Image (cartoon, helix red, strand yellow):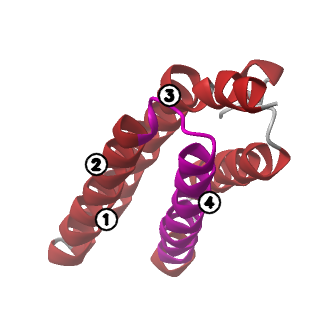
Amino acid sequence: MLTWSPEFETGVAMIDNDHQQLVKGLNDLERALADGQGSAKIANLLAFLEKYAAEHFRREEDCMQRHRCPVAAANEKAHQQFMAKFASAKARIAKSPGSSALVAIQTQRELSDWIVQHILRVDLHIKACIGEAR
């Protein structure tokens, strides 16, 4: 399970709230997988994560562009890679429904690792950008 930490806070309430919702969604997925919940529940959680991540990425990219963050282009590229990885996982699940739980577990782990590293290495740059804009 991911645990939200103050070290993840960007100082932008909207972005921090989005990050917390993504962490909650990943934790919900981990719980559903651990509890052996059905494929419909897991599919719904994956769909939520995909949709929410896309919406969050748009908001975050707009914020970085507005504040002229030097990492804005790298952030956008990382978001595209994340969505491609997610699409690949969905395709693997669709091709092999019998192995969907295994693919979902792998996807949950990869996405959990990705989001923590992305927040710490890229998103936290927003703090400095907003500080410079003030």
Q: Earlier in the sequence, mark 3 or mark 4?
A: 4
Q: Please tell me how crowded label 2 is: few (under 14), some (14-19), or many (20+) other residues with Cα within 10 Å.
A: few
Distance from the alpha carbon under mark 1 to that under mark 4? 31 Å
Q: Which residue is mark 4?
A: 59
Secondary structure at badge 4 equals helix
Residue 100's tag is 1
In the displayed structure image, the side of residue 122 where residue 59 appears, left or right: right
Quadrant, the N terminus: top right
Q: What distance separates the C-alpha of mark 1 from that of mark 3?
A: 31 Å
Mark closest to the chain's N terminus, 1 or 4:
4
Query: Callout 1: few (<14), some (14-19), or many (20+) C-alpha neighbours within 10 Å?
Result: some
Rendered image quadrant of residue 77: top left
Instruction: Say if the magenta span includes residue 54.
Output: yes
Q: Residue at x 44, y 31 (%)?
A: 71
Tell me which segment is drawn in magenta.
43-72
Q: Which residue is mark 3?
A: 122
Task: Tell me where residue 24 appears, x and y as whole percent.
Answer: 72, 50
Q: Residue type at mark 2?
A: Gln
Residue neighbourhood size for the residue with mark 3, other residues' Cα within 10 Å, grouped as few (<14), some (14–19), many (≥20): some
Viewport quadrant of the C terminus? top right
Q: Residue at x 67, y 21 (%)?
A: 128
